[in-house]
Amino acid sequence: MSVRREDVEKIVQAVGGADNIEVATHCVTRLRFSLADESKVDKQALDDNELAKGYFSTQGQFQVIIGPGIVDKAYDELIAITGGQRATKDDVKAAAIKHKSPVQQFIKTLSDIFIPLLPALVTAGLLLGINNLLTGKDIFFAGQSLVQVYPQWADFAAIVNTIASTAFTFLPALVGWSAATRFGGSPLLGVVLGLILVNPGLLSAYDYANAVNEGTVPTWNLFGLHINAVGYQGQVLPMLVAAYVLVVIEKWLNRKVPDSLKLLLVAPIALLVTGFLAFVVIGPVTFTLGNWLTSGVVWLFDTVPWLGGLLYGGLYAPLVITGMHHTFLAVDLQLINSDAAGHSTFLWPMLALSNIAQGAAALAMMFVIRSQKMKSLSATTSVTAFLGVTEPAVFGVNVRYKYPLFMGMAGSAIGGILLTMNDVRAFAVGVGGLPGFLAINVGDWPIFFIGMGIALVIPFVGTVVYGKIVTRKQAQSGEAVEEDLADRDVKKVENAKSPIPAAGNTVVQHADSSAARTSTAASSSEAVNVLDLTAPIQGRAVPLENVPDPAFAEKQMGEGIAIEPTDGRVVAPFDGTVAHVIDKSKHAVILEHATGVQVLIHVGIDTVGLKGSGFKAHVATGDVVKEGQLLLEFDREAIKAAGYATISPVIIPVGQDIVESIEEIPGNAEAGETPILRVHLTGSGV
């Protein structure tokens, strides 16, 4: 399809004109802008534009959805019209950051650092919970622990504790790796610096308080300057600042040192200087600041515990929506490693209750809404929330209907008050939702279980009751009750502006996978009425609403399904031609069937930012492929470590005349074998 220049000109004017565009780039589906002033955007003009299929703003970027296959043409026209320079996604992100306040930039930085650490922290927290079951008194036997009654389990518990506590003991090394990566330095130097700060030859931070009381803190005499030879086990702030200083020095040296000497000079000098600064200045100052922060938080919850529980318990879900919740992970870790807080945190138990409350509210929507698809989504997302991952439930269900979100907030706020009034503590982080009790001090279990009951019952009952009232009033007033989501999506797609001429109607249905491959394409001489798409990626097929990206979740680009991958291979879902491979990033591919039907396979979310790292293409644009043939390979762990979601949308872009309806086939999917989409054609197929 050709792109009309006047449509692109209208987009330029709608986003405030060329002078309002600081940087612009594109991915496989969208134009991405960093705008000088987003208030100048004319949203009505974008709604009226035939080329723009949607738009939204996120993390300082304004994104206009164009659609696969033509967005590159639209971008070419954009550059020609504005006379701007071609840019990368990183250029847009860098420009967008400038529009964030210092507080927003700080929060974003902390999120970028701690999100990659979550797998290690969750694992450590879960294992510490198991150790808690083995060594906690009064759990299985009155006044005794399991290992006291059965001593043969003692060494097993000791090994579990060693494995579990390692992530927290060497936390500075983990933070050093992630922080150095985020600041643009060498991750390996960040790890080494973290290990320096927890060197076994130093007095452990866990023993520092006793050493101070006994007057036995070891010191170095550096030309008359006495420096405490103390480690920073479990500390966050010292490592964050030290990693930043390390990267600044490393970058400066890389600019000044000749290439032939970089290997010999850059790393040794950077580590030596930063190491001295860490022990002499950075460590003592940030350690003191961390203690002040901890003491302040402890004072607040000791003085007015009900207020702390009300605010943190009630507002944690909105923090998830904004992404600010990752900031508090640093506070939790600081509390756990602080003497002032008793090496425990009172914040994490409320997080666990918030997970449960939002899950209960999402589950309750099964009994309120009529849409079978939304009922299924409510059930699946509530399970993930109960296990500690709330984003699918919050974004897919609760924010969509609003009142479940508020009911969940009410339940977790009341539960939070109960917990803080009774000083319920967790000795580890990482385990949320229903398994969260494993991280709670055994003596606090009774109160915590009552809090769990509150977080389950209040949101569930409140959502069901209020939801029934709302739907009854809508029915009585003649308003549309929450219609079946499929019907809503039909209307949405019928009215959508097409990236492909003359949009056809798209109806979403669910199919039984057992009958999925009964296509009428018996031979090449017969018309194809039904086209089955097998899973291009091994994993679990789930509704698009589970995708943490509004362009896909709201189906602004087309209907389809998403796959939570368990393998790193992308194969062809049918015999066809490679219409387009994103050469630089290799994160997406468009295939075309002989009937003309096109499918977009997009690996992960926002993975264009990886610039091809972790991806390998096995085909090129124009190649003819067979069903099951390898198209791409990707490194799931590398994508996760970089902070990107691996869930992969598979969509049929809107605007294809030949497409009459689409059936989704969710469930476990075998790559190249299990059908995940059935496309009903208008009869004009080959």
Image (cartoon, grey):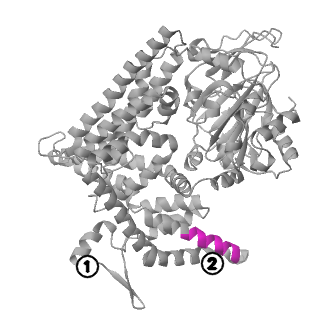
Residue 556 spot, x, y in % from top left = 67, 28
Residue at left offset 23%, top offset 45%: 421
Q: Secondary structure at mark 2?
A: helix
Up/down of 402 relative to 528, above or below: below
Q: Quadrant of residue 358?
A: top left
**CA neighbours of label 1 inside 10 A, class few (<14), some (14 to 19), many (20+):** few
Identified by mark 2, the residue type is: Leu
Q: Amino acid at mark 1?
A: Thr
Residue found 39% across the figure and 36% down from its top: 355
The quarter of the rendered structure image containing the N terminus is top right
Mark 1 element type: loop
Tag 2 residue: 265
Which of the two labelled residues, at mark 2 and mark 1, occupies the earlier sequence position?
A: 1
Task: Say whether residue 435 is left or right of residue 91.
Answer: left
Asked where in the image residue 451 lies, by quadrant, the reply is: top left
Q: Quadrant of the C terminus?
A: top right
Q: Position of residue 532 (x, y in %)?
A: 68, 18
Percent coordinates x, y for residue 401 in the rendering: 49, 25
Labels in figure, total: 2
Q: Is residue 674 left or right of residue 366?
A: right
Judging depth in this view, the residue of 414 and 276 nearest the camera is 414
Which range of residues does the magenta coloring cover? 245-256
Majority secondary structure of magenta residues: helix
Residue 411: image location, x then y, percent: 34, 33
Residue 248 visible in the displayed image: yes
Q: Is residue 478 in the magenta section?
A: no
- Crowd tier of the residue under label 2, counting other residues whose Cα lies within 10 Å: few below 14, some 14–19, many 20 or above: some
Identify the residue under disc 1.
216
**Outermost residue to the bottom:** 223
Residue at the extreme left = 143
Is 247 magenta? The answer is: yes
Q: How far apart, in angstroms, are the residues tagged by discs 2 and 1?
A: 37 Å
